[in-house]
């Protein structure tokens, strides 16, 4: 599983959920919190400094996103600038909600379209392909 930050038309590098040894793992609340506190927060800060614009943190209602510790960190890091279940409204956006962020769905649709006829020799090939497409999109925006 991976994560990408999209801010003001800019796309961050792809962040992968993996162990310290590089093994791919699924995202859970603990891993998501760790990524929020490190890679995601730093990527957002960097983009805010480069653009001079304040970013909003927006996420769906996936279980990893609504853990108590995650919500606490969001309140600390993004006071008044977050859109998430259990914070701004008492609703339950389903995980993978297309209503939440069309930019994310545009990016992943583009990645899938470009990869649909490729043959891969393992997860590392998939990762490298996804990262190359995201990097190209990032270069197109700068």
Image (tube, rainbow, N blue to C red):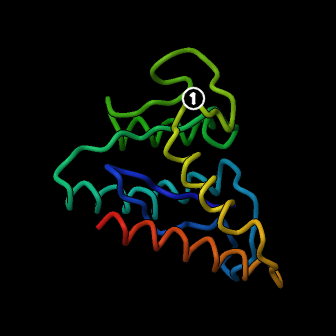
Q: Nearer the viewer, residue 24 or 123?
A: 123
Q: As rendered, which of 136 and 30 lies closer to the eye?
A: 136
Q: In x, y percent, where is residue 90?
A: 56, 14
Name the image quarter holding the C terminus. Answer: bottom left
> What count of labels does the image hold?
1
Q: Residue 70 at x, y = what percent?
A: 55, 42
Asked if 118 appears above or below 36 in the picture, the reply is below
**Secondary structure type for disc 1:** loop
**Residue that lies at the very extreme toward the left in this rendered image:** 52
- Left or right: where does residue 138 sit relative to residue 95? left
- Residue at image position (55%, 66%) is 15
Residue named by callout 1: 99
* 62 vs 109, nearest the viewer: 109
> Residue 132: which quarter of the image?
bottom right
Which of the 4 image quadrants contains residue 16? Answer: bottom right
Q: Is 1 placed above or below 8 here? A: below
Taking depth in this image into account, of 33 and 121 the one nearest to the observer is 121
Q: Residue 47: x and y, percent?
A: 29, 59
The image quadrant where one finds the N terminus is: bottom right
* Label 1 Cα crowd, 10 Å radius (few <14 / some 14-19 / many 20+): few
Q: Tell me the residue at 46%/73% (across/down).
A: 136
Q: Residue at x 20, y 61 (%)?
A: 50
């Amino acid at each position: 599983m991976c994560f990408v930050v999209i801010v003001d038309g800019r796309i961050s590098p792809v962040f992968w959920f993996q162990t310290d040894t590089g093994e791919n793992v699924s995202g859970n609340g603990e891993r998501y919190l760790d990524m929020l506190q490190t890679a995601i927060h730093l990527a957002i800060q960097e983009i805010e400094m480069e653009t001079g614009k304040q970013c909003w943190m927006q996420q769906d209602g996936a279980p990893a996103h609504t853990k108590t510790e995650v919500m606490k960190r969001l309140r600390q890091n993004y006071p008044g600038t977050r859109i998430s279940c259990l914070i701004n409204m008492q609703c339950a956006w389903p995980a993978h909600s297309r209503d939440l962020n069309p930019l994310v769905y545009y990016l992943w649709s583009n990645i899938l379209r470009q990869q649909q006829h490729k043959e891969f020799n393992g997860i590392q090939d998939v990762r490298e392909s996804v990262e190359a497409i995201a990097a190209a999109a990032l270069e197109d925006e700068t």
